[in-house]
Image (cartoon, rainbow, N blue to C red):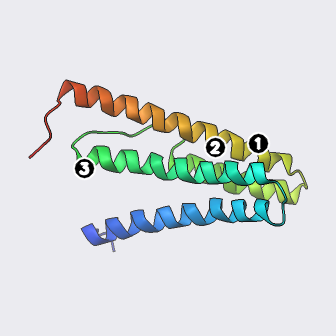
Amino acid sequence: MGTSSRWGSFLDSTLDRLGDAAIFAGLAIWFFEGGDDRLLAYVALWALVMGSVTSYTRAKAESLGMQARGGIAERADRLVAVLVLTFFADLLDLPILLTIVLWALAVASTITVGQRMVLVRRQALANPVLPS
């Protein structure tokens, strides 16, 4: 243990995206079917897409030699929020908690993508030549 490899790093990132997708897709499916709330299903899908784009912006920036960390809704923040509030929404029979967290994550993830795009644009304008 205590070692890392390029394959392990790639696999870890890929499985992270699949795990994120499973959570938000599961919520979307539930809202389309049992939850009977199409709007929240679409919000869950938007949160899924923007979460993936958040991760992509960082990976793409790093592949171009730039940094794109930070923002108001990084992966850990999104996962803790959705998992904890989903748990309490069910435990306390307060479905409004799920509504709040999905809307908040959809908005926060969209803002995070914007923040990262601005950050990368500034770096790109300061050094517009692609690395060889």
Residue 48 position (above or below residue 61): below
- Left or right position of 99 against 10: right
Q: Residues within 10 Å of mark 1 (few under 14, many from 20)?
A: few
Residue 59 position (above or below residue 90): above
Dot 2 amino acid type: Leu
- Left or right position of 81 against 72: right
Q: What element carries label 2?
A: helix
Q: Residue at x 30, y 43 (%)?
A: 61
Q: x and y percent of residue 102 in the render? A: 70, 47
* Closer to us: 127 or 31: 31
In the rendered image, the residue lying farthest to the right is 93
Q: What element carries label 3?
A: helix
Residue 5: quadrant of the picture: bottom left
* Closer to us: 61 or 29: 29
Would you say residue 126 is visible in this rendering? yes
Tag 3–tag 2 contact (CB < 8 Å): no
Dot 1 amino acid type: Ile
Q: What element carries label 1?
A: helix
Q: Residue at x 17, y 31 (%)?
A: 128
The first of marks 1 and 3 along the sequence is 3
The first of marks 3 and 2 along the sequence is 3
Q: Which residue, given by chain and number where applicable, does mark 3 sit on?
A: 63
Q: Which residue, given by chain and number where applicable, does mark 2 sit on?
A: 105
Dot 3 amino acid type: Ser
- Left or right position of 36 against 61: right
Q: Which residue, given by chain and number where applicable, does mark 1 sit on?
A: 100
